[in-house]
Amino acid sequence: MLDERFGQRESVRLGEIEAVLCVPVRAASVAGVVYLQNRAGGGPFDDSDVERVELIARMMGRIAGRLLELRRHRDERDATREIRQRINASGVLGRSEALARLLERLEMIAPMQNNVLLTGPSGTGKSTLARLLHLNSPRADGPFVQLNCAALPESLVESELFGAERGAHSGVAHRGVEGNVEAAAGGTLFLDEIGELPLAVQAKVLMLVEDKQYRRLGSNRLRTVDIRLIAATNRDLRRAIDARTFREDLYYRLRVLQLRVPALSERRGDIPLLAEHFVARSCARSGVEHMELSPTVLAAIQQAEWPGNVRELVSFCEEAIINARLARSTTIEMRHAFPTLSADEGASSATFQSARQQWERSFLSAALTQRDWNVAQTARELEMSRSHLNTLIRRYALIREG
């Protein structure tokens, strides 16, 4: 009532409010407040009052976090339940509407014989979707053969893809080799990162797409094969066409049926479920006691951006497990998930992005240093595209030391 900022307010006069003490209750973010009005005996609240209420608020925050997590599980609706009853969706985790729409389109496309182009950001699980297309198709009993076009030296791509006759190059001096195309006969051939194929090989893939025919390296004999081709890319192929690094005719032949895999940021509701799965899987593989992610961590990671998508989330979980084990904890708390933050920063969801960025910068710097700054090798072993790794190196101004 004596404060000129509030003294004239009707609510203050009617309630004869002398003092107010308000402390936030934190559960991931601010879940509420403890509000005290008027101190017994009159007068302002002192520092000891503040300390006691802050202690109570922290205790309430832990309870509120657990209750909010229970409510999240209770209120979750599995939008994929019906579609999962109709198709084989093994290996795909999530309950979101975005995932349900993806699986519904997969159900429609899988029985067709047309080639399929999978698009979407790196690390979203396009290889898993390619396998599901195969498993839900009439070719399910045939082979599923996968080739990462970016993982091979340009000199070996053609022989790996189409095979080679004896003497075609030093690697097949004494006998011919079967290529991935031949190995996929009667089934599905999946070409991951097709945007990285050399132009010379793209022309031969076009013939395979159009006529189901190919030639082994070093041979003039045309071979015919019965395959379904699934290709995947995280590149903008239209831009690649403009830059004359990808054939326009091949692009149009591939894009008859398209399936876009959503980024993790488009299916945020699935992030806690995925993280819990990755933690459980990593613990089982390592033979360590099962760990749980605290409600605070689960809420924080659900609101984050994950430019590396599922692959980045996997790495994040594995790093958090190691930190929790070092601290001899069976629960992954904020201090384990984001060890570079202070306790105060860790309590605020507003600082989560800076926490993730600090962790990501440290993780990438260590990975590059361990591999003597071999960017291609680091990208391959981290299962991310080289272009994405270069983008992160520039973003975090990473430099080679020494």
Image: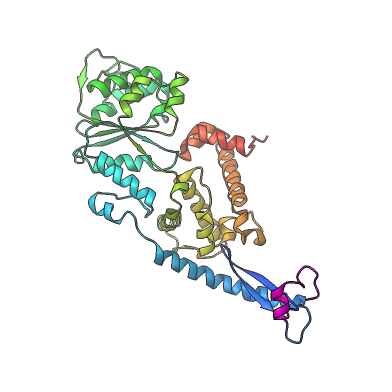
Q: Is residue 138 left or right of residue 323?
A: left
Observer-nearest residue: 122 or 302?
Answer: 302
Observer-nearest residue: 347 or 238?
Answer: 238
Q: Quadrant of residue 10?
A: bottom right
Q: Which residues are magenta?
A: 1-17
Report the residue at 50% width, 65% height from top.
330
Observer-nearest residue: 143 or 43?
Answer: 43
* Residue 238 x %, y %: 43, 25
Q: Which quarter of the image is occupied by the C terminus?
A: top right
Q: Is residue 98 above or below residue 242?
A: below
Q: Is residue 278 visible?
A: no
* Residue 212 x %, y %: 23, 23
* Residue 174 x %, y %: 28, 19
Q: Quadrant of residue 119?
A: top left
Observer-nearest residue: 6 or 159?
Answer: 6
Report the residue at 35% width, 40% height from top.
127
Q: Which quarter of the image is occupied by the N terminus?
A: bottom right
* Residue 391 x %, y %: 56, 34
Report the residue at 51% width, 51% height from top.
316
